[in-house]
Amino acid sequence: MTAFQLRPEQINVFQKHVLEHYRRHGRKFPWRDTIDPYQILVSEIMLQQTQVDRVIPKFEAFINRFQNPAELAAAPLRDVLAMWQGLGYNRRAQALHRCAILIVNEHGGRLPKTREGLQALPGIGPYTAAAVSVFAYNRPCVFIETNIRAVYIHCFFPDAQDVSDAQLKPLIEATLYKRDPRRWYNALMDYGVQIKKLHGNPARRSRHHSVQSRFEGSDRQIRGMIVRILGETKEMNTRELMRRIGREPERVRAIIEQLAAEGLVVINRTRLSLP
C-alpha cells in the first residue's frame, strides 16, 4: 500500500485512532508544556540517543541554569559539560553551546524560524530542524524517528521486511494532521511507544534499524569518564588521569587526543583541562 492508495476515509480513521489514543494515554513531559523554541531545541538535542526518563531531570536542571540562549552562550563550555553529565555524547552539549553563541551573535538571541535557518546552526540536521519547526512553531513538516517508524510499519506494512523510510515518508505526509501538527506528532510518538509495548518493536523490520553498540568498556564510556573527571578539577596531570581511568594507556591517550581535536579537552604539555 502506498500513500496514493489511501482514501480520505482511511486517513480520517487512522488520524482519529491515533489522536484518541493520545487523548486517553498521552504522556506528560516538561518540553510539551512549552512552545519556547530554545527549550524545544534543548529537549530535542538531549533526546537524541538518550532515554526519556534520563532526560527529564537533566532538561529541567539545564533550563533552570541556562534559561535562554544568551545565558548559555555566556557560560564557559566546562559549565555546560558539567550540566550535561549523565546524558552522554558530550559533543551534543558542545554543539548546543555553539548554537547559542551563533543565535546570540547572528540572530539577536532568537532561534531562526525557518527549517533552513535552523539547519544552518551547528549540529542541527534535517530531523532536529523539522522537529523544532513542528513543536515550537506548529508547522506541518514531515519527519521520522523510531516511534513514528514503528507506527507506520505496524499499521501499513504488517508483514513486510526491510521497509525503507522512503516508503514511509509519503504515508507520513498523506496522513499528517495539518490542523495541529504539534499534537499530531506527540500523538504518533506516544502511539508508537504503546505499539512497542504490545507487539514488540516493528521498527526492527526497518531497513534503517540498528542496535547500539555495548557501552560498558567502550570508547564512549572512556570519553565520558575523561570529561567527568576533568570536570571535577581545574586541571590534571595526564598520568594521573590515565591512572584513574584504569584502561590501556595508548587507548586512553588516543581518546584524549581525539577529544582535544574536537575541542572538548585542552592539552597543555602534560596537563589536561576542559575548555
Image (tube, rainbow, N blue to C red):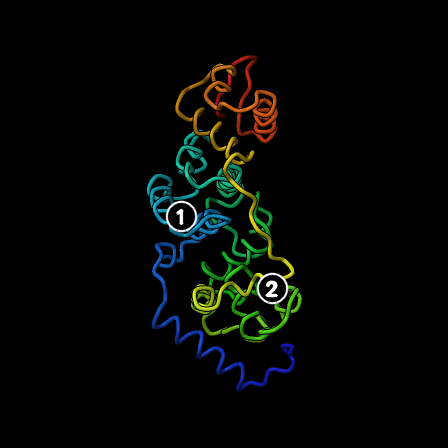
* Label disc, if present, on residue 205 of the rendered structure: 2
Question: In the rendered view, would you say 9 is above or below 131?
Answer: below
- Image disc number at residue 55: 1
Name the one closer to the observer, 262 or 155. 155
Task: Please tell me whether mark 2 sits on a helix, a strand or a loop.
Answer: helix
Point out residue 100 in the picture as x, y percentages from the top left corner: 48, 41
Q: Secondary structure at mark 1?
A: helix
As drawn, 64 above or below 272: below
Residue 87 point in image, percent of width and height: 44, 41
Q: Amino acid at mark 1?
A: Val
Task: Identify residue type, mark 2.
Answer: Arg
Sequence-wise, the earlier of marks 2 and 1 is 1
Contact between marks 2 and 1 (CB within 8 A): the answer is: no
**Front residue (pair 214, 235):** 214
Numbered label tally: 2
- The answer to which of 242 and 28 lies nearer the viewer is 242
Quarter holding residue 76: top left
Viewer-proximal residue, 118 or 247?
Answer: 247
Q: Is residue 272 depicted above or below 96 in this figure?
A: above
Q: Local crowd at mark 2 within 10 Å, few (<14), some, or many (≥20)?
A: many
Q: CA distance from mark 2 to mark 1?
A: 27 Å
Picture residue at 42% right of the left edge, 38% below the top: 84
